């Protein structure tokens, strides 16, 4: 533990001196920001334990300190994004985004309307009404299947009528 | 020759609402066209039928129904022949 922690101590010193290096924290440590836990070097704890009488309470407090130190060095990523959106926040954001989109559309109307005109597919106001209608009537099904079947059989009947010779003597005096 | 196909297309145009029809072969080449329809659309119609059939290869050949407020186009393939019927829609 002492060996491991010595890395953190170095890290701490270097970050305090303000020079960024490969051991500098990129993320702000949320736990150490929230809690005012004094970082204590584990070697201090060990030396203190050696100097004092090895009482059980001291051992317990030393363990607690180690636990706290570990906690200060852990970045809880899940806790960073714990803010849940409420229903009214969704609505507010939706309104805000809508107004933003309208603003962008108003300022770049010429550019955007050109692109919109080139698009064949367009938004329809009440899609559920159109989607709920019957896709195709049975009359149409009968019409298309019977006519295509009739056409297919008619095409089978297409054959070349032999009327005259394909090879014709051309400009030959027999 | 193609008299039979002509007759089939003639009958089709006499059906209520139908104003045009196109038939294409498996390569999208036009076999016949009657009424208000273009020979140029034969290739597109063949391609639509072919692509739609790929959606569910195990099912039988689909009927593709394209529709707007007043017109409809119905596409279907039987064997190698693809047919498209253009119709007026009322209501």
Image (spheres, coloured by chain):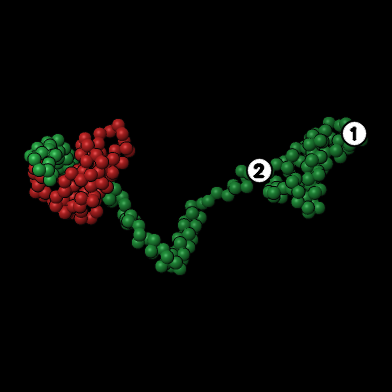
Chain colours: A green, B red
- Crowd rating for badge 1 (residues with CA inside 10 Å; few <14, some 14–19, many 20+): few
Which one is nearer the viewer's eye here, A162 or A112?
A162
Disc 2 chain ID: A
Name the residue: 23% across, 44% down: B29
Q: Earlier in the sequence, mark 1 or mark 2?
A: 1
Q: Is residue A169 visible?
A: yes
- Quarter that holds the C terminus of chain A: top left
- Percent position (x, y) of residue B82? 21, 41
Dot 1 and dot 2 within a common chain: yes
Q: Secondary structure at mark 2?
A: loop
Which one is nearer the viewer's eye here, A51 or A94?
A94
Name the residue: 83% across, 31% down: A56
Q: Is residue B15 visible?
A: no
- Percent position (x, y) of residue A44? 86, 40
- Quarter that holds the N terminus of chain A: top right
- Percent position (x, y) of residue B74? 21, 46
Q: Are marks 1 and 2 in contact (CB under 8 Å)?
A: no
Disc 1 chain ID: A
Q: Calculate the distance from the C-alpha at mark 1 to the C-alpha at mark 2.
A: 34 Å
Left or right of A105, for residue B90:
left
Left or right of A84, for residue A136:
left
Which one is nearer the viewer's eye here, A2 or B63?
B63
- Crowd rating for badge 2 (residues with CA inside 10 Å; few <14, some 14–19, many 20+): few
Which residue is label 2 attached to? A76
**On the image, which quarter does residue A68 sit in?**
top right
Name the residue: 78% across, 50% down: A15
- Percent position (x, y) of residue A28? 69, 50
Name the residue: 78% across, 42% down: A8
**On the image, which quarter does residue B56 sit in?**
top left
Q: Secondary structure at mark 1?
A: helix
Which residue is label 1 attached to? A50
């Amino acid at each position: 533990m002492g060996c491991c922690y010595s890395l953190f101590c170095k890290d701490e010193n270097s970050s305090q001196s303000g020079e960024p290096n490969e051991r500098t924290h990129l993320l702000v440590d949320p736990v150490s920001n929230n809690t005012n836990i004094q970082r204590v070097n584990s070697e201090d704890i060990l030396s203190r334990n050696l100097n004092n009488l090895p009482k059980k309470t001291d051992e317990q407090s030393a363990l607690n300190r180690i636990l706290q130190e570990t906690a200060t060095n852990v970045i809880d990523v899940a806790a960073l994004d714990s803010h849940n959106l409420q229903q009214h926040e969704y609505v507010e954001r939706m309104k805000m985004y809508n107004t933003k989109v309208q603003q962008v559309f108003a300022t770049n109307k010429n550019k955007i309307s050109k692109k919109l005109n080139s698009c064949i597919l367009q938004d329809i106001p009440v899609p559920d009404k159109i989607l709920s209608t019957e896709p195709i009537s049975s009359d149409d099904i009968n019409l298309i299947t019977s006519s295509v079947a009739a056409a297919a059989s008619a095409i089978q009947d297409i054959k070349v009528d032999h009327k005259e010779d394909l090879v014709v003597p051309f400009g030959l005096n027999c | 020759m193609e008299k039979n196909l002509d007759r089939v297309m003639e009958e089709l145009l006499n059906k209520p609402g139908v104003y045009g029809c196109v038939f294409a072969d498996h390569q999208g080449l036009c076999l016949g066209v009657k009424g208000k329809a273009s020979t140029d659309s034969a290739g597109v119609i063949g391609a639509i039928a072919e692509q739609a059939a790929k959606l569910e290869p195990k099912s039988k050949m689909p009927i593709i129904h394209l529709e707007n407020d007043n017109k409809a186009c119905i596409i279907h393939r039987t064997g190698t022949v693809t047919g498209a019927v253009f119709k007026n829609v009322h209501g």
